[in-house]
Image (tube, rainbow, N blue to C red):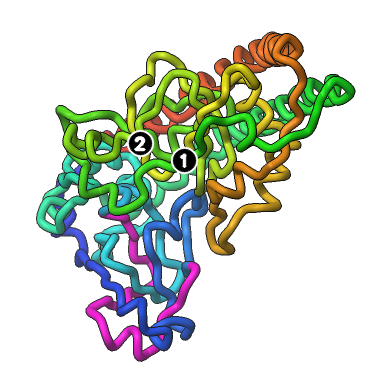
Amino acid sequence: MEYQRYQLRDIGDIVSGATPKTTVAENFGGAIPWLTPADLSGYTQKYISRGKRNLTQLGYDSCSTQIMPSGTVLFSSRAPIGYTAIAKNPICTNQGFKSIVPKPFVNSEFLYYQLIYLRKTIQDMGSGTTFKEISAKKFGAVQVTIPPLVEQEHIISRIEELFSQLDVSVNELKTAKERLKVYRQAVLKEAFDSVQDTCEVTTIQSVCEDIKVGIVIKPTQYYVESGGIYAFRNANVRRGFIEDSDWAMISKEGHEKNKRSEVHTGDVLIARSGVNLGMASAVSEKFNGYNAIDVVIAVPKHECVLSQYLAYYTNSPYGMNSVKSNQRGVAQGHLNVTVYGKLPVMLPPLGIQKQVVSKIEEQLSICDEIEKTVDTALQQAEALRQSILKKAFEGKL
């Protein structure tokens, strides 16, 4: 069946949002639901009723945001592009959205699924140096396929039937990943428990030449899209490995101005905030000379401690518990450099450290292989999800 093609601007009203002055406390805490893209980060439900903060009538009247009706399809247009949900009730947003109030011939759920399918296409249309953003003009020009309402409802039903079956497998895979996390922690705990009798307990700062932090003052002023130096962010620092993707890049001039935050082989990086808070990884030769943004950089005294040992210890239940009990900030945890330096560390002789690292790596290598298999299966599941949507909007489902 051939479906009629439309531009988004032809199937509904595109609405942008706004933010009242955040320095005026009276603008917030009222009864008007208000969303930012952060409210959709990690959000997996189709409908949303509110975000973390509501506006007061004063806050609403002080800016250009608009209350949109239930059924509005919300689409984040910046930082990042592509979060999608449907308003469960009247709601307004900040400027990080291009939302669509569909016309009567468009089912909100049908449009919701189509925007998920088109997410990558729309992301590629974005522009900007600090972060990608899509303008209302470009967004409005995005083409979508719209069959009659009866057919839209049939397609929605079929998509949800297939997604439901797929979700069962995905949930099993995610459960397996969670079990692997528990296993990793058990391996680390057992490894450090086994050497307690040979350890002195000292502080991390006593076994490091330096503990510092990456660029924290307006790092975006140095951002470039090409020809610069890659820079670590908290998202690149994982528990025991480097996430080698989605790098920030700063200019060579910015790098020279911030040489103190240059990282070198053997340094240990610790995520300072966000969901990766406290995660640590040693820097391999591949990343020598990169810079770092708002990441803790520990420079070990190699005559005292092995880089891998310090990273594994930081990632162990002992290190994690110390980090969590000493983090700063309520809304978002934050690891202070001085606090990290004062954390206790079990320190056996170098020979025993090597044995500990070797034992951990042997056991975790098995875990890594299993996790790769699980991750591959999850990627295949996502590809299948996109395939289902592709067939749906081509009239082949």
Residue at 53 percent across and 30 percent down: it is 209
- Residue ranking furthest to the right: 197
As shown in the figure, which amino acid type bears the numbered disc 1? Lys
Marks 1 and 2, how far apart in space?
8 Å
As shown in the figure, which amino acid type bears the numbered disc 2? Arg
Decide if residue 91 is on the left or right side of residue 50: left
Q: Is residue 158 above or below residue 378?
A: below
User: In this view of the protein, which residue sits in the foreground, 92 or 110?
Assistant: 92
Q: Is residue 54 magenta?
A: yes
Decide if residue 211 is on the left or right side of residue 345: left
Residue 256 occupies which quadrant of the picture?
top left
Q: Which residue is mark 2?
A: 260
Marks 1 and 2 in Cβ contact (< 8 Å):
yes
Residue at 16 percent across and 46 percent down: it is 128
Residue at 63 percent across and 29 percent down: it is 207
Instruction: Specify few, some or many for label 1: CA neighbours under 10 Å numbering under 14, 14-19, or 20 or more.
Output: some
Q: Position of residue 229 (x, y in %)?
A: 24, 29
User: In this view of the protein, which residue sits in the foreground, 142 or 56?
Assistant: 56
Q: Earlier in the sequence, mark 1 or mark 2?
A: 1
Decide if residue 280 is on the left or right side of residue 249: right
Give the position of the N terminus as an image quadrant.
top left
Q: Which residue is mark 1?
A: 212
Q: Which residues are magenta?
A: 52-77
Q: Is residue 305 magenta?
A: no
